[in-house]
Amino acid sequence: EAGVAQSPRYKIIEKRQSVAFWCNPISGHATLYWYQQILGQGPKLLIQFQNNGVVDDSQLPKDRFSAERLKGVDSTLKIQPAKLEDSAVYLCASSLEGPSLGVSTDTQYFGPGTRLTVL
Amino acid sequence: DAKTTQPNSMESNEEEPVHLPCNHSTISGTDYIHWYRQLPSQGPEYVIHGLTSNVNNRMASLAIAEDRKSSTLILHRATLRDAAVYYCILDNYGQNFVFGPGTRLSVLP
């Protein structure tokens, strides 16, 4: 079974530039998550989708970050404009069902991440 | 905010058992206890989860205290490939699913 795919794996940009990351979840998974992981810290949830609707985006810096999930499958995360503090690994994960479908707990499957460096 | 506390780091010798502790004193009755691990340069991967009873799978065992305020992830025979950051996370309908800094496990040959 194919896992969660992410691209690109690495990206280097100058501050104030824009960048986009792409994620293809495991086939049939209803829930998709984007996390930000700063060096030395655990991943922090940015946004969670259930099919193509947003469940939780409370920690997404909406002045510069945006995300969408096309037709409930693939997703893109965009940063515009980037700041130095956005340097991190951006992880995408998916799960079969998820909390809003009445499941009390679910397993998340993570992609390899995109390492972003902002200069 | 993470509702679990773990030691920052632990060391183990190869082929010996490893017991990774986690405290979750404010756990609610419906919180599941999950463990994930993150190998170098990879995304986190699921290890095991449980609610009240001890659990075993091919990767590890999870021992849950009777009062559920702590749990222990047990790797029965550590290998070099088990060197990773281990995260203990509570999950309740998606609430509280917060990664803390985890425990960095080093395995010595």
Image (spheres, coloured by chain):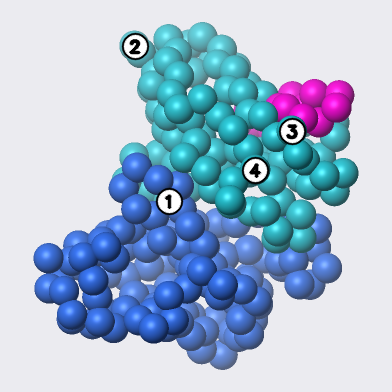
Q: Earlier in the sequence, mark 1 or mark 2?
A: 1
The residues bearing labels 2 and 3 have C-alpha atoms spaced at a distance of 35 Å
Question: For mark 3, does the 10 Å Cα neighbourhood hold few (<14), some (14 to 19), or many (20 or more) residues?
Answer: few
Q: Earlier in the sequence, mark 4 or mark 3?
A: 4
Q: Which mark is residue B3?
A: 4
**Is residue B61 highlighted in magenta?**
yes
Q: Earlier in the sequence, mark 2 or mark 3?
A: 3
Amino acid at pointer 2: Pro
Host chain of mark 3: B
Q: Secondary structure at mark 4?
A: loop
Name the residue beneath numbered marker 1: B43
Name the residue beneath numbered marker 2: B109
**Which mark is nearer the camera, 1 or 2?**
1
Residue at image point 61% right, 81% down: A54
Numbered range of the magenta stretch: B56-71
Q: Is residue B92 visible?
A: yes
Q: Earlier in the sequence, mark 4 or mark 1?
A: 4
Chain shaded blue: A
